[in-house]
């Protein structure tokens, strides 16, 4: 933010407080809990919990990505 001359106050809009954010940090990695999986008729069913502020889609992306993402065009 320093290189862009920005501060946390730049994310606060007085006229539209419902759109304003105070900002914060997210964990780069996390540990999921209660991971369960089941294979049914060519389908993989998964269940898990992630910490507040984490995205479940990050874990799902890791589960479904190909063995060699570069060769697969990612």
Image (cartoon, helix red, strand yellow):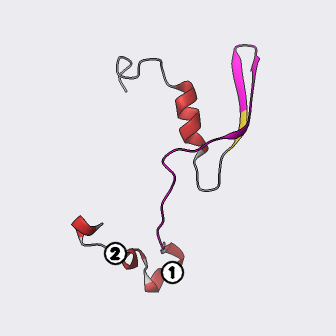
Kindly identify which residue carries mark 1: 17
Residue 69 falls inside the magenta stretch: no
In the displayed orientation, state which residue is furthest to the bottom: 14
- State whether residue 10 is above or below residue 53: below
Residue range (magenta): 22-46
Disc 1 versus disc 2: nearer the observer = 2
Picture quarter containing residue 41? top right
Above or below, comparing residue 28 to residue 42 in the picture? below
Left/right of residue 43 with respect to residue 21 in the rendered view: right
- What is the secondary structure assignment of the residue under circle 1? helix
Label 2 Cα neighbours within 10 Å, binned few <14 / some 14-19 / many ≥20: few
**Residue pictured at 58% horizontal, 50% vertical:** 54
**Is 41 positioned to the left or the right of 22 in the image?**
right
Q: Is residue 48 above or below residue 64?
A: below
Mark 2, secondary structure of its residue: loop
Q: What quarter of the picture does the N terminus occupy?
A: bottom left
Residue for badge 2: 7
Query: What percent of the width, then of the height, locates residue 44?
Result: 69, 22
Quarter of the image where the C terminus is located: top left
Distance from the alpha carbon under mark 1 to that under mark 2 = 17 Å
User: Where does the image place residue 43, in percent across and percent down from the top left?
Assistant: 70, 19
Give coordinates of residue 57: x percent, y percent. 57, 40
Quick one: label 1, few (<14), some, or many (20+) residues within 10 Å? few
- The tag earlier along the polypeptide, 1 or 2, is 2
């Amino acid at each position: 933010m320093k290189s862009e001359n920005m501060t946390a106050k730049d994310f606060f809009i007085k006229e539209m407080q419902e759109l304003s954010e105070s900002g914060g940090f997210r964990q780069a990695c996390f540990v999921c809990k209660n991971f369960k999986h089941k294979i049914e008729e060519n389908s993989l069913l998964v269940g898990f919990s992630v910490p507040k502020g984490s995205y479940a889609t990050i874990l799902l992306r890791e589960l479904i990505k190909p063995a060699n993402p570069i060769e697969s065009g990612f």
